[in-house]
Image (spheres, grey):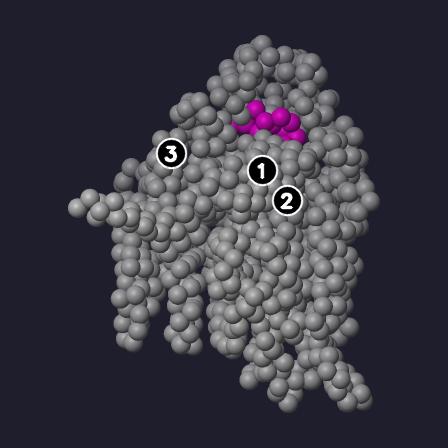
Amino acid sequence: MSFKRVSKLGRIRSFSAFFGTFLLTLLIIGVVIPGASIAADAGVSDTLEERISPMGRVHVEGDDSFEPAVEAEASEAEEVVPYQMKKPSRSDYPDVGVSSRAIVWVLAQLHLFFGALVLAIPLFVLVIELVGVSTGDERYDSMAQEFMKISLTGFSITAIIGGSLAIALFTLYPDLMAYMTHVFGAQMLVYASLFFFESFFLYTYYYGWNAMRYGNLKWLHLTLGLLLNAAGMTIMVMANSWATFMMAPSGVNEVGQVVGNIWEVMKGPLWNPINLHRFIANIAFGGAVVGAYAAFKFLSTRDPEERAHYDWMGYTSNFIAILSFLPLPFAGYWLMAEIYAYSQQMGITAMGGILAWLFIVQAVLIGTILLAANYYLWAGMSRTEGSERYKPLIKVIAFVLVTCFLVWVTPHTLILSATEIAALGGSHHHLLGPLGIMPAKNIAVNLMLIVTFLSFQLYRRSDKVATVSWAPFGNALMVAIYVVAVANVIFAGVYYGYFTNTVYKVGSSVMQVCSTLVVIVVGITLDAFLFKGAKTLPSYWGKVPDRAQYALFALPVAFTWLMGLMGYVRSSVKTHWHVYTVMKDNSPDNFIPTIGYAGNMITLVTVLFLVMVLFMFWIANLSATKQAKPVASVDGGAA
Amino acid sequence: MNNEKSGGAGSVVLAFVAFGIALAVFYGLDHFIMNIQGLPLNWDLTPAG
Amino acid sequence: MNVLGKTLGFSLGMILIFTLVANLLPQVEGEAPVEQKVDLGALTMESYIALGEALFSGKGTCTLCHNAMGRAPDLLVMNVGGAAEKHLEDERYKGKATNIEEYLHESMVDPGAFVVASFGKKGSNDTESPMPAVNKAPIELSEIEINAIIAFLQFKDGNDVTVELPTEAPPVEAAPAAGSAPAPAATAEDAIKKYGCQACHSMLGTESSVGPALDGIGSRQSAEQISLSITDPAAAIAEGFTPGVMPADFAEKMTVKELKMIIDLLLEQR
């Protein structure tokens, strides 16, 4: 059996470095934006008001003393009859026999899945194409094209589900949608018009691929890709603003009248955190889904050439998924911090109240993702001869992962209602109380991320031997960084988490996060220099056990389910409000459903998504299938 | 991470130097991160203020 | 086809595991934002102060700004009672409070009454407070909760705790009327105010988690059931709530007209 030997690993490394830099840039953006907003806040007491007051105040009926100040100002300024937001009562919600929320839930989540997929794929396709141009390796170009091919139907599916969702929303929640249309107005038309641009760039980008493959035309093609992404990103952030407006309204007063311009309405406190979070998560999600495609193709063929190709494609997808997954907790951390800053009540509802159990499920899902990703990396080490040296470390990584995972899923202290406390027998976990509170979880999560990055780094090093003169020192420094970072994460968690006050406890979690980031950043940077002109050990694509491919199925399944779960919490923190503090939800579904019910819904959506993705892949392969012409010998003989 | 046996004493020194650098970096990081959050630390990392 | 079967089976198996985990966890439905419930019957001053402390960092969202980061006076570190005394004598003080307890109460529901120097809204020259009134949305502390925080603030510096424990009858809004004989309420809203229903029940746009929420009660209960629950609260206790918290003497206090108005209003809550 002969395996295709890939000797040009330098290209893969440069791709890694490229992608790494790309994600680092994202991270920096993520750090700078909140940093800037913190800086703007520093010592300015009225920004606090800005953060809190957009929530508005509920008008208490019969309370004469209450008079919305803004309303008064508005009526003084101009004698226009102010828009009256309709406060829907239960009878205003059409009853279609099934839960309206369930219908919208399924459609919205499916729309989000496909939307995420078709926004993410062109993004890393463009990056891969760019890598292909800069390295001159045609394989990148072909792979990028293949990624586009398999996702092409996804754009139509997204649009179809999006249309159905809009119909469902306007039919089932007419008053809410009337209000949303009033608030966003022309922005929704701009949104719709962007689809024309999206489609135009999509089709020219995809169908023009071979027509614009070399030279200056290639740059034109890359530009089309960039514009496609620009249109896609704009669509995403516009749609995000609707969701964040409903969570944390801005630009409207307490009775729902629009008092700001469209920019003030869009730019709510949660907008950018959601934008960043979804942007990064989309990439991870998209990478995971195309990874499953590669794994499927890998398993379906015995041809060594094809296996080598799909192994490489699966590896790249996994690489994209994991590298974008690693900073995701930090983006989530920012989002959560902003939610707390906007409304502590909302934060508590999410993290410490009814929804807190959800984070146990989240831990199970993320644990699955990390274990699967690590397993795939370890299995992938069999591709190279140089991986033997790292074998012992893998046992340590596996041990740390499992231990941290167990700490993480330990239920933590919850703020519970009397019935819940009665049902559980006390608000603290009987045996594992101290392991259940946040500092312990922060330690666990950060350690899991650090060791996952270690797996990642070991894998990337497994086929190389550094030749630079300072290699021993570089290695010693890397080891020291790992040791000290792990020690620092544990120290910060234990000392500030258990022995100082709350402010320091919260502050120390930032310290932990930064320690983890330092490991990732130093790891990527150091390796880039350390392995410049490194000796490359033989490496064989396709030489990977079949069972490793199942990790590539575990990833998208867990990602999809996780996204569904996070959709449940994002929507639920609004509790019984359509638009938090402005428009109450009086529909029969205005309660937060149980985690079990949500789980069943998420499973339904995930299975539907799975079926549709299979359809999408099938269509992609259909286009490459050509029916053989019926043998004409009979006809010919007759003539 | 480098399992190639290099000179015994030299590699120990290297390890110590690297360890020292890492310690210094993270010590500085801890102070910096807590300070920008308005949570100053004493030299021994106990909360100040 | 074999590969398709295996991979699909694997994927569906994983999905089932996740579903199972979600269904094994305690199943809690969130009727309304539930946080903490206070059993007034079993309340001691210690637990009341503890409640105040929990509210201070929790639902009250006080520590969001009242911390060491300089957005607002760091109440946890300073002597709150001493500062309040000074502020009462300050010439810039324009509130109505005469003692520390009243001052603290006023500072929460009308933060603009006195703005500590350098903590005012930017550009207002310390005449406007950036702090939201805590009895309004989104914080929406009840009178009992506000007093719990006052008790905590007085206790933590070793000052005298002058706050009285909340009794069975919620003191909300009824306090100003004390002394004179209560006049019959003219409207249903007045009657609800008079008897302080909103201190414990979420209704008419206010929120409280002490008692069951009455939003939409009209679609769940008949006039007879509502009437019984007011005149004899112990007759039926909603699941998850403690018997004996709701005053049992409304039957003596309410006029027939007031009772009728309240029932009619509640029946309209659908």
Closer to the camera in the image, A439 or C113: A439
Under mark 3, the amino acid is Ala
Q: Is residue A361 above or below residue A497?
A: above
Q: Residue A86, image x and y in percent?
A: 38, 32
- Residue marked by disc 1: A599
Closer to the camera in the image, C160 or A126: A126
SS label for mark 2: helix
Q: Residue C90, image x and y in percent?
A: 62, 55
Q: Which mark is residue A361?
A: 2
- Is B43 left, or right, of A107 in this rendering? right
Q: Which mark is residue A25?
A: none
Q: Residue A155, image x and y in percent?
A: 36, 50
Q: Is residue A4 magenta?
A: no
Q: Is residue A342 above or below residue A505?
A: above
Q: Is residue A37 above or below residue A190?
A: below
- Report whether mark 3 lies on the same chain as mark 2: yes
For marks 1 and 3, the one nearer the N-term is: 3
Closer to the camera in the image, A175 or A4: A4
In which quadrant of the rendered view does residue A569 lie?
A: top right
Label 3, label 2: how many angstroms apart (C-alpha)?
A: 29 Å
- Residue marked by disc 3: A168
CB under 8 Å between discs 1 and 2: yes
**Residue neighbourhood size for the residue with mark 3, other residues' Cα within 10 Å, grouped as few (<14), some (14–19), many (≥20):** some
Label 1, label 3: how many angstroms apart (C-alpha)?
A: 22 Å
The magenta span reads: C200-214
- Main SS, magenta residues: loop
Under mark 1, the amino acid is Gly
